[in-house]
Image (cartoon, rainbow, N blue to C red):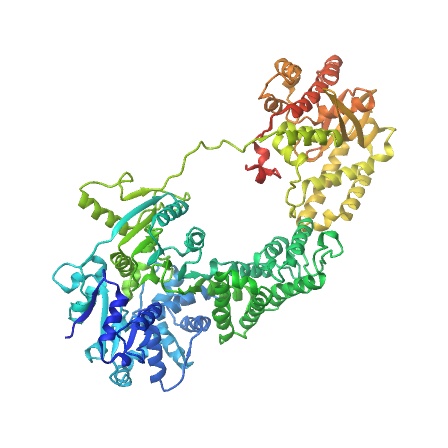
Amino acid sequence: MQPITLIPWHTDFMPALTEYLVRREDFSDLTVLFPHNRPRRHLKALLTAHAALPRPVFMPQMTSIAEFVSGLHRNLSETPFIQANQLDLVTLLFEVVNDLRTRSGSLLSRLPELDLEAFLPWGIRLAKLMDDLLRQDITPQDLTYMQGEVSSYAAGLLEQIQAIHEAFIDRVRAKGWTTAGLSAKYILEHLDAVETSLNGKPIIAAGFYALSGAEDTLFKTLWQAGLLHPIIHGDPAMANTNRPHWAAAEHSAWLERWRTHAEIPDWAESAETKPAVRFCEGYDRHSQLAGLVEDMQEADGLDETAVVLPDEGALLPILHMLPEKEPNISMGYPLERTSLARLIETLLTLQENRLDDGRYYWRDLIALIRHPYLRLLGPDDKPLRKVLHIWESRIREGEKYVDPFLWEPPYTDEILDEVDKLVAEPLRQEVLRHCLTSFEQADTLAKVGDALNTLAALLHAQGERLWHTYLIDAECLFRLTSSVIPELKSAEASHEEFSRTTLYSFLRRMLSQERVSFEPEPLAGLQVLGVLETRLLHFKRLFILDAVEERLPGTNPYDPLLPDPLRKLLGLPDARERDNVSGYNFYRLLMGAQEAVIYYQSGVQPGLLDSKSVRSRFVEQLLWEQEQKKGKILDTDDALIHSVTFPASPLPSGPDAIPVTDAIRSALLEKLTSRGLSPSSLDRYMNCPKQFFYAYLTRVRPIQSVDEDGDRSEFGSLIHEVLKEFLTPYIGIETELGKLDAALLMKKFNDIFAASDFFARLPLDTRMGLKETGRYRLTEFLASQQTATLMGLEKSLQSQVEIDGTAIPFSGQIDRIEQRDQEIFILDYKTGNAPMPKKGFWQDMELIERLESYGRDVIDPTLLTDLAAEIRSVQLPAYLYLYSLSERQYPAYAGLIKLGENGSEQLLFGPKWTPEERAEAVEEMTPLLVQTLVRHMLLAADFAPQPGTRCTWCDYSIPCGK
């Protein structure tokens, strides 16, 4: 038998193949078959530049094996056929499986029947399995008693896999459809006709490694007929008596099946070389990229250099790190990881969460209007950016569900003076129409396709500059319009109505399977490739990233229908063959290089349930070979292994303080003397000076957002309003407050609550819950009140505090002031938690002495922290001081009315306090406390954070860095 031509893998395959083709007299009659399409571009370029090739000349036909088989099928078939739509195959298999459920005694007949949506993931896996069996030329046998290996439904399918396979073939052919597997089956059934149709024209099978069953039968038949000649690229040891590399296992099995041998032609022989391999160990991807940048900067030019990415997710990060800003990308990138897929997912989520009355969930709308594509649409001045920014703020101030078609931008407002309404408003309406309305009405696959088509048209027409700038996004948009949309619209069931969840499941599954293909142009220079894209190519220098076990050889996701251990039962390739293919791709690429740097992640465990990153077994073998040569174990101290490290610094114990500069001190003094202070601002400063800085001195404001369960502070304000209106008629009159009519209070509460905007924004369950809770709490509150003369409700008081010659306005609003037995009570309503000063504070003479001695010349760095721990809230003492300054009278008591509990009263001074002790606390210690806090504010060297539980709900946690 004729031998198979072997080109050693240390030799550049494409130039060697070019040399072989040029030497043949039947050059123009040749058909060159490749495992995939990418090598064709390289071969054409090499043939075009070859000096020995006469001109003019017809090029050989160059094609992939998939196109070759499909072309033979098309030429030999007596009836035309069309490529089957994946969605149609799922529907067809759904019908097949439902028909087989009627077989009595079968496992499927005893299981619940699935609807199309639930069957979808099974149908997609089943369709792939059918095609795998056809491409491997396997007629499956039923796998029974699989319940312990797979789920019950999968076991039911495997129990009748032979009948499913037969019915699948018959029904697909009856509809005039085909798949890659069915085309291969047709060719094997008509091998004599295939030989005849070739008319004796020779075929070169170039660069194949692991043949499928159908490929093996076809190639062997044509080889035996003298029509096909394989040229493989592999270990030269296969051509002599030496033991070949393990990565050549599939080549060796191929030679054994065909009972032939490999032969290296004279023109392909060359001295075998070994690449200079180094290793770079990083603790994460960023450290690997840092090592890559360092190595590239030290390299003498980057021509004939490849950056190989086993994980396509590294493509975008690496593009920002390369020294050449326009590398040649040659790889497939998952469409579902792109910004376009994120926009589509946002549109689907909008519809899934939409109410029947047409209103949309506010978070979904914000996700839409914040998408960068929409903000960049239109003319160069991007008119939608400001409009959408204002719209977002309005949504955050509104209700949980929003009708986007009712809002109109305030074009007459000065904030939109620079926006042309005649340009921005039609564009905004167009966005709403194509992003919302068109998807609202989509109840078939065809209408979903039409909605996506109009979206793509909008993006293309209104963002043309965008696609010239962001080429990856342009490729994604092209893939959507050329693959996803046509498949949706061409399905046989495209005009059949489905539920929204079924339609979106179809679309999401399609997006998850699509890959955006990037072709290199030009073919020289720095190349960025995936591992599969390196097949048959040759590079002098390699940078291989993420060489960890889960990427090289890689782990396939678990298949719930046919797990890997069961594939051998059907005769299908399993993980061992996939590992061989991965190993061959890796070592073939490596053996042809002069220099290679392999980067891997070591010893990093991302999460509790995540596996630890382990360097690839291929890397381990290369290291072991080096260790054999050196006779010692290699570690990061060796020159061959570089460990990426960064300068270490102490771990920060918390967010940094904000130093008080001269500018900040001037701004603080100006703000204090003009705006003044309140008891709540003093409280904020004591508990967290950094929070006080952001709230008082900066324009940083918390991001507003809809409180879906109701804003506690807003509900508290509503309760304050109810109590004020209810109690106002009794001001100045001694009243038994506990005996007032509770029914009138309930009516007042119901009226004010129902009329509030707060009430309208609440969902029904929250609204009813708050209503019942409010009625109950107010009833308890009224029952616990004492006889008193009300002197003021929600009373505003103003005065000033003078500190070291600086007069600072001091003002506040006291919820309730009343008189009992000739003594003044200051009361503050609290609907939530209300901390009070610890009882021991008033007797803590050491802390009091620190307050008295604090000044410009006294350094007491822990004073504020100790005060916050002892006092917890300065509001009640501050109210006492403010009242005494404003009214020239010292109140006897201050306390909280806990509306959030039972309306009970908690006084600042307990019943055991004597009048003298209360007078000392109110007249001496409280002024000292307030004045010291203000003095501390004026003299502070920085605004330090006070981390604690309050950080959880602090509005400034993001700028603070907590």
Picture layout, residue 890 above or below residue 265: above
x 76%, y 27%: residue = 810
- Residue 383, by quadrant, is bottom right
* Rendered-image quadrant of the C terminus: top right
Residue 825, image x, y percentages: 78, 24
Q: Horizontal placement of 870 versus 247: left or right? A: right
Residue 29, image x, y percentages: 27, 81
Q: Horizontal placement of 919 versus 47: left or right? A: right
- Residue 10, by quadrant, is bottom left
Could one spot residue 902 in this view of the protein? yes
Q: Horizontal placement of 743 versus 570: left or right? A: right
Residue 904, image x, y percentages: 72, 29
* Rendered-image quadrant of the N terminus: bottom left
Residue 311, image x, y percentages: 38, 55
In this view, the residue in front, 906 or 276, is 276
Picture layout, residue 116 above or below residue 652: below
- Residue 367, by quadrant, is bottom right
Q: Horizontal placement of 334 versus 52: left or right? A: right
In this view, the residue in front, 238 or 137, is 238
Picture layout, residue 170 above or below residue 556: below
x 39%, y 86%: residue = 79
In this view, the residue in front, 683 or 724, is 683
Residue closest to the far bottom? 78
